[in-house]
Image (cartoon, helix red, strand yellow):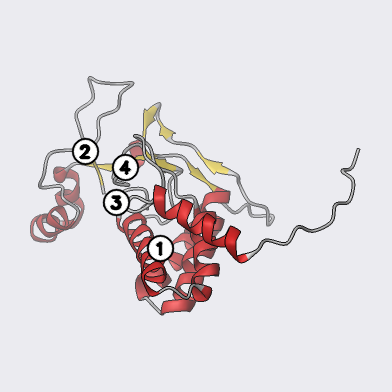
Amino acid sequence: QLAADTEPVRIDETQLAEAVQTLLRIYDADNGGFGGGTTKFPQPVYLDFLMTVAPGIDDPAARNAVDNAIRRTLDKMATGGINDHLAGGFHRYSVDPRWEVPHFEKMLYDNAQLATTYATRYMQTGDPLDARVVRNTLDYVLREMTDSRGGFYSAQDAEAQHREGLTFLWTPEEVRTVLGDDDGAFACRVYSLDKPANFRDPHHPEDPPSHVL
């Protein structure tokens, strides 16, 4: 049974301002993103809303707070482990508030929404980081989540060979083997592989620790 038609509800300026203030109250000023807890989801709809209403905010302090929340959240996600820096695409969420270690599953709807969000921000600011994220994300979707007959796959599993995130994890030795000693050492510094490992599979504690880039 189809739902009955309903009249559109007009949202006034007061309601918009209240929604903005609600998001700013739950905004993580240190790490970007919204909400507390031990996990963090991208929530692109929040960012899309803020980017839509920001031009109409007259108060300079409020406008600056909104712009900072948008920029810091997008930058932190783009440079964090939730973004796959090699293959492109975003993982579903991070298991820490810093966007450092992801739950490794990749969802089609997340990447579609995030590509749109970063593209919108790029059109507003011209930031090349946003453009690069859009290209890398859509390249990933076309390469890994598109069927040869034109359809799309809904998700990419978090596991490989019954190991969580196996194809997304690195050791310093593996990086040096692929890139050579000099370039490998440089990559390890850039991606903090010269620091203690940030991932250990909770289901296989006997496996050695490794790094999410």
The residue beneath circle 4 is: 97
Does residue 76 lie above or below 55 as drawn? above
Frontmost of labels 4 and 2 is 4
- SS of the residue at dot 1? helix
* Of the image marks 4 and 2, the number of the one nearer the N terminus: 4
Residue at horizontal 47%, vertical 51%?
A: 22
- SS of the residue at dot 3? loop
* Of the image marks 3 and 4, the number of the one nearer the N terminus: 3
Which label was assigned to residue 198?
2
What is the x, y in percent for residue 210? 21, 37
Q: Are marks 1 and 4 in contact (CB under 8 Å)?
A: no
Q: Nearer the viewer, residue 80 or 175?
A: 80
C-alpha gap between disc 3 and disc 4 = 7 Å
Q: Are marks 3 and 1 in contact (CB under 8 Å)?
A: no
Q: Are marks 2 and 3 in contact (CB under 8 Å)?
A: no
What is the x, y in percent for residue 31? 29, 51
Tell me if 85 is positioned left or right of 15 in this view.
left
Frontmost of labels 2 and 3 is 3
Which label was assigned to residue 70?
1
**Amino acid type at mark 1:** Ile
- SS of the residue at dot 4? loop
Which label was assigned to residue 31?
3
